[in-house]
Amino acid sequence: MSVVKPLGILAAVAALSGMAPASAAAQTAAAPTFTKDVAPIFQNKCEACHRPESIAPMSLVTFEESRPWARSIKNRVTARQMPPWHIDKTIGIQDFKNDRSLTDKEVDTITRWVDAGSPKGDPKDMPAPVPWPSEQGWNFARQFGQAAPDLVVKSLSWTQKAGANDAWWKPVVETGLTEARWVRAIEIRPGSVKGRKITHHAIARLQQKETDDLAANPNDANGNPLPGTFMEWAVGKQGEIMRPGSGKLMLPGSKIVWDIHYSNGGEDVTDQVELGIYFYPKGQEPKFRQVLHLMGATNAGGVDIPPNVVKATEGYFVLRENGRVESFQPHMHLRGKAMSMEAILPNGQLQVLSHVSDFNFNWHNSYVYADNAAPLLPKGTILKITAWHDNTTANKANPDPNVWVGYGDRTVDEMGHAWVNVTYMSDADYRAEVAARKQTLGLTTDRQQQ
């Protein structure tokens, strides 16, 4: 198996009493401050959630908002609980476009700031505020120079009553498209701030008559094509931007099949989920098509967990065409423990691509590979997804280790699959991509590169 890895002792007080003020001053000067050292870290890695009216329980935008939480912040970052990033840093690919984990240096900076009493520092050192959109603004609109997405598809409204049991709302909505359009970015969100309190997650599935076998789904009992996964909203995931030159294809007459999980918000809340779609301009269509696949244990027969055991479940997906793996998102429930994605190449070589060793159902992270790290795999490659479930008392999130657990939608049921984006390409394009990757990385061998 080959594994892909990233390239004062104090003297007597009496003897030094005259030096104490200078020493203390030096230590104070060396201590990190919020304005100069900590605020840039929070802006880069924390404010996406920790800002006013966002999903986090407190804002970390200003010193006054952050200071009361200093000790708790230190505890969370040193334990690597925050920011949420559960990829094992000792296994597989480590270069990601959306890596929000803290470096060792950043953790050390925050720790020393707290240990020094959490000083504010010079207000002149404070970086300019990040121009976040309002909570109901669209994150990608400004990036594309737009006021809003090109197309917004809304689910039908749902009212979740205070104290009601969890509900799964699955309306079907027409997209209204009359011609084929290529998608360059997708966002999804509850329609209001209160809606975020009751929406556990929301999946938008795209149903259309496919023209490409690689993207086609099986038909249902009535002969209609089953919908394919398009985008999900959950804590930790709001949307995606396609890699340049690739996109998803929406066809005329397509529909969005919603799968929305609502939970108790403590009050009556009526809301609807909104899907924002950004198209490539006409005449600038991408060369490659990207498809989001479910891989692993994807049905009721794939998950069978007896009481008081830790069990591994495997699933396999064969690439019928050359492809670039864009992202990896594990999906399990409360008993989820870990998940890995491996590639079994046509020559029999096994490569570990990614491993989430500390899965947490409270966070739905999609790990998007960096441009020069996204695996390039030949057709015939088998992607192996292994999920581990912990149905024992050692799992603090386990509601009951003494019951059998099977596949199901409820949080107390289980799932064991990964959502994996794949961009497909022809033999000639694949060879060109591999050659360009080798040149960029300074590689001259013919060894398969990931």
Image (cartoon, grey):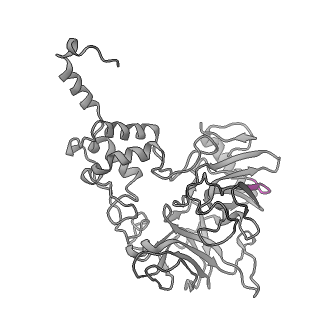
Front residue of 368/300: it is: 300
Q: Residue at x 73, y 60 (%)?
A: 426
Q: Residue furthest top?
A: 15
Determine whether 229 is above or below 450 in the image: below
Q: Residue at x 29, y 55 (%)?
A: 129
* Quarter occupied by the N terminus: top right
Measured from the top left, where is residue 324 in percent x and y?
67, 56
Measured from the top left, where is residue 245 in percent x and y?
59, 61
Q: Is residue 403 left or right of residue 256?
A: right
Q: Residue at x 23, y 41 (%)?
A: 121
Numbered circles on residues, count = 0
Measured from the top left, where is residue 169 in percent x and y?
55, 81
Q: Is residue 166 left or right of residue 384?
A: left
Determine whether 396 is above or below 239 in the image: above
Specify whether residue 149 is in view: no
Determine whether 49 is above or below 180 in the image: above
Q: Is residue 246 left or right of residue 214?
A: left
Q: Is residue 99 magenta?
A: no
Q: Which residues are magenta?
A: 378-384
Front residue of 271/336: it is: 336
